[in-house]
Image (spheres, rainbow, N blue to C red):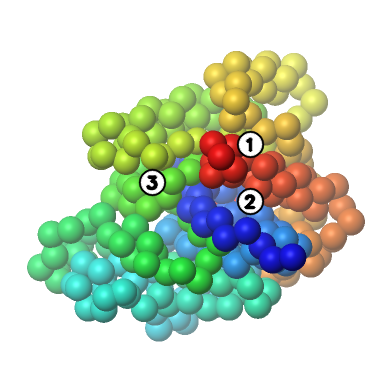
Amino acid sequence: MGVSPIRRRIAFINEKGGSCKTTLASNVGDYLSRVKGQRVLLVDLDPQGQLGKVLGVDVGALRKTALDMLLDVVMGEDAPPTLPVVKARHPRLDLIPANKSLALFPQEVAAHGGEEYFCLREAVEPSTDYDFILFDAPPSFGTITLNVLLAATEVLLPVPLTYLALDGAAELTRTVEMVRSRFGHPALQISLVVPTFARRTRMAAEILEKLRQHFPKQIAQTVLGYSVLIDQAQSCSKTIFEYAPRSVAARWMTAVAEELLARDPARLSG
Ligand SMILES: Nc1ncnc2c1ncn2[C@@H]1O[C@H](COP(=O)(O)OP(=O)(O)OP(=O)(O)O)[C@@H](O)[C@H]1O
Ligand SMILES: [Mg+2]
């Protein structure tokens, strides 16, 4: 029978660069749409534009991007705004791509005489076309990251098993707490903490243990190791399910997506 009409907005976020945000967003999005029949919108909020790039979109050549969607809301152009969606890999998988232009978002708002900088939620909320909206955040803290946290109700936090990344995870927890209290968004919660880039070293094991202590409820069972297939798939603009569906890397991505499905806040509280 049909898919339950859940609608979840999840931020893939870690202020630390190279923590596996884009890789997880693209592959989990592909799995949820391809295998689970969910209608998924991926939204790239990183000026690096890598979510589009790994899905084969020429992000430099686009007429409309995430920046236009945000500015439409700022300028009150459309109500509800038209989303600059492109199709990605699969009929149920849509993408709003970004490119370098997004880095100038605050300046663009000012140049257009706008005063509202937090408009992502307003841009995506009216859409009833999706079961999941997955936001790929940039590796820094600023206006864009705050927009992502205000538009999402859940966070998926990927954490490389290194000492500095552990510090970054604690930082993100404080940021989420600040958004809940100071920015009036108490519904925001960390749903899943995913250990990434695991190695068989004592240091990695200790960091994983610390993560488990820090996030006893949110820590994922799945731990992502290293696989060159992930890099290779991205170099061919393919997801791991297209490139190497029987690989261990595909099993990792499947397991993370299934854990995310199992942690549906609506189902858990119901
Ligand atoms: N499990 C893995 N094994 C090997 N390489 C990986 C794995 N996961 C991701 N990578 C590679 O690591 C790099 C960083 O991953 P990714 O771009 O997903 O991180 P990110 O958090 O989105 O980075 P940024 O902060 O720059 O946006 C990429 O080149 C990707 O191909
Ligand atoms: Mg990224």
Task: Determine the secondary structure under disc 3.
Answer: helix
Say few, some or many: other residues with alpha carbon within 10 Å of mark 2 (under 14 / 14 to 19 / 20 or more): many
Q: Ligand 1 closer than 8 Å to the CB at disc 2?
A: yes
Q: Is residue 14 left or right of residue 78?
A: right
Q: Residue at x 31, y 62 (%)?
A: 122
Residue kind at label 1, given as amino acid type: Val
Task: Determine the secondary structure under disc 1.
Answer: strand
| Quadrant where the N terminus is found in the figure | bottom right
Residue 265 image position (x, y, % from top left)? 54, 41
Residue kind at label 2, given as amino acid type: Leu
Which residue was labeled with disc 2?
A: 24
| Quadrant where the C terminus is found in the figure | top right
In the rendered image, is residue 156 in sight?
no
Q: Ligand 1 closer than 8 Å to the CB at disc 1?
A: no
Q: Quadrant of residue 240?
A: bottom right
Q: CA distance from mark 1 to mark 2?
A: 10 Å
Residue kind at label 3, given as amino acid type: Leu
Q: Which mark is residue 149?
A: 3
Residue 124 image position (x, y, % from top left)? 39, 64
Farthest residue, direction right: 246
Marked residue nearer the N-terminal end (1 or 2): 2
Task: Determine the secondary structure under disc 2.
Answer: helix
Q: Is residue 122 above or below residue 77?
A: above
Q: Residue at x 66, y 55 (%)?
A: 28
Residue 144 image position (x, y, % from top left)? 34, 53
Q: Residue at x 18, y 72 (%)?
A: 75
Between 4 and 202, the residue placed more toward the observer is 4
Which residue was labeled with disc 1?
A: 194
Say few, some or many: other residues with alpha carbon within 10 Å of mark 1 (under 14 / 14 to 19 / 20 or more): many
Q: CA distance from mark 2 to mark 3?
A: 17 Å
